[in-house]
Image (spheres, rainbow, N blue to C red):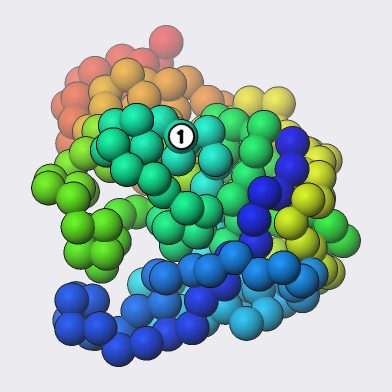
Amino acid sequence: MRILSVNVGAACDAEWAGALKRTAIDKQAVGHRVAVRDNGLAGDERADQKHHGSPDSAVYSYAREDYDWWERELGRELRDGRFGENLTTSGIDVNGALIGERWRVGSALLEVTGPRTPCVVFRNWMDEPGWLKRFTRAGRPGAYLRVVELGELGAGDEVEVVFRPGVGVSVGDWFRARNGDRDALHRILDVPGHDAKWDVMAEQVFGENEVGGRAGG
């Protein structure tokens, strides 16, 4: 399990970039080691601080294996960084990672916080018909991470999973459940100590009686 590419980008003006008309989604690979700071990688900018400025989305990772799948689906090449990720990985199931899982990458420690939510900027950047629906249906969102320990990392570094909850919610199930997948939501409800927000969602999806019945065994 390793990092294939470390990608950063500068914010720039773009008429197609939603209401803000400014974006840093065009991430490019760098050949040097990069410092990992509290708010992400050195040299990486986020134009939309309202939606992408949280510490829980400091670093975005996407698997090369998922890119390979998309290349077959779209019939086009997709370079590392094309989806706007900071870390392009190889050999790790990013979507199967559990929320709270921790990765040692280089000298930095990162923690998985959740899936990427596709937005209008991503849609316009990809310029593919029905892109948001296709991306959502595929269930390959990639994972956001927060910075637990500062450090530095670079292409070729191993990804070491130093902590993984015994039970938990996967990035993929979180993404699918939030987008109406009933099976994924059931799996989340079966996780002891799951966030109460999933119970609220379950009541909306299944109805209060079904949720109450599951809670009562």
The residue at which mark 1 appears reads as 68
> What is the residue that sits farthest to the right in this orientation?
107
Q: Is residue 207 visible?
A: yes
Report the side of 53 relative to 207 (left or right): right
Which residue in the rendered view is the most extreme toward the bottom? 13
* Quarter of the rendering containing residue 209: top left
Q: Is residue 78 above or below residue 209?
A: below
Relative placement, left or right, of 12 versus 42 is left
Figure quadrant of the N terminus: top right
Work out whether 72 lies above or below 213.
Answer: below
- Which residue occupies 44% across, 62% down? 84
Location of residue 150 in the rendering, given as x and y in whole percent from the top left corner: 80, 70
**Seen in the image, is 102 located left or right of residue 8?**
right
Image position, residue 203 (x, y; %): 23, 33
Indicate whether 188 appears above or below 142.
above
Q: Quadrant of the C terminus?
A: top left
**What residue is rendered at 52% in x and 53% in y?**
80
Residue at 62% x, 82% y is 43
Element marked by disc 1:
helix
